Image (cartoon, rainbow, N blue to C red):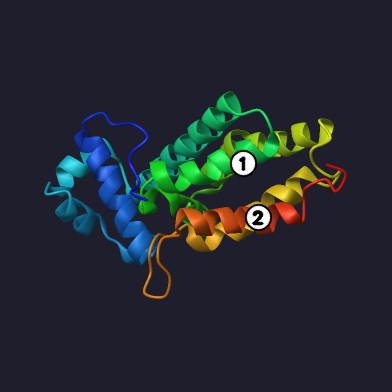
Amino acid sequence: MKPSAVDNAPPSMRDKILHQTTRLFVERGYDGVSIREIAEACSITKAALYYHFVDKERLLIEILETGLDAFHQLLEDARQNYQSAQTRIRAFVFSLFTRLPPENRAVIRLATQEMGKLQPELRTQFAQHYREKFLQPLMDIFTEGQKAGELRPLSAELAVWALLGMLYPFMSGESALRQEPSPQQLEQLLDIFWIGIASHSR
């Protein structure tokens, strides 16, 4: 599967900065990348970089928020185009790996690993957005599936964290030990998940 961008519009300099910074943060971590290195990766001066972003912290929060918006859009597309909980979750999972490049998927890792680098108010703000735009829509899918008798009555929040826990190892793209999951492997992953959560009466 070759991921494509959710938005195919020509990238602006701001988009280029976000793309290159995301790649660097994913590869080396927030503390492992300097403003100078980000500017060099974008072929611009530090002054030009500061024109778009006042500091590295603002770059990180913008990356997290942009990634969150992309995840939210994939969830909304799945909810609008499919009816059952299982088909919606399947559509969302497959869209993660076909519509988002690996570094964009890895934003979820950045959110868990680098959140502590943000000021408390920014951290609180992003945590609220993370729940509203990502966790809650996922929980709503499971809750609606329970109401329809499709799923067993269990904690929707626990179901979400179980699903994300299974997806988490694949959120950083290819590595020396693991390649991108194939469509068949994604199907198998979802089978493993649903066998434990699908209603036995259906």
Q: Residue at x 38, y 69 (%)?
A: 175
Q: Amino acid at mark 1?
A: Ile
- Quarter location, residue 167: bottom right
Q: Residue at x 38, y 53 (%)?
A: 102
Q: Amino acid at mark 2?
A: Asp
- Quarter location, residue 29: bottom left
Estimate the x, y position of residue 96 in percent, counting from the top left.
47, 45
Residue 196 appears left or right of 81: right
Residue 123 appears left or right of 26: right
Name the one closer to the observer, 189 or 158: 189
Res 5 visible: yes
- The residue pinned by badge 1 equals 89
Q: Quadrant of the C terminus?
A: top right
In the rendered structure, which disc, 1 or 2, sits on the residue that comes first in sequence?
1
Res 131 visible: no
Estimate the x, y position of residue 135 in percent, counting from the top left.
64, 41
183 in relation to 129, above or below: below
Estimate the x, y position of residue 61 in percent, counting from the top left.
43, 44
Q: CA distance from mark 1 to mark 2?
A: 12 Å
Image mark for residue 198: none
Estimate the x, y position of residue 31 in percent, counting from the top left.
37, 64
* SS type, badge 2: helix
Residue 111 appears left or right of 9: right
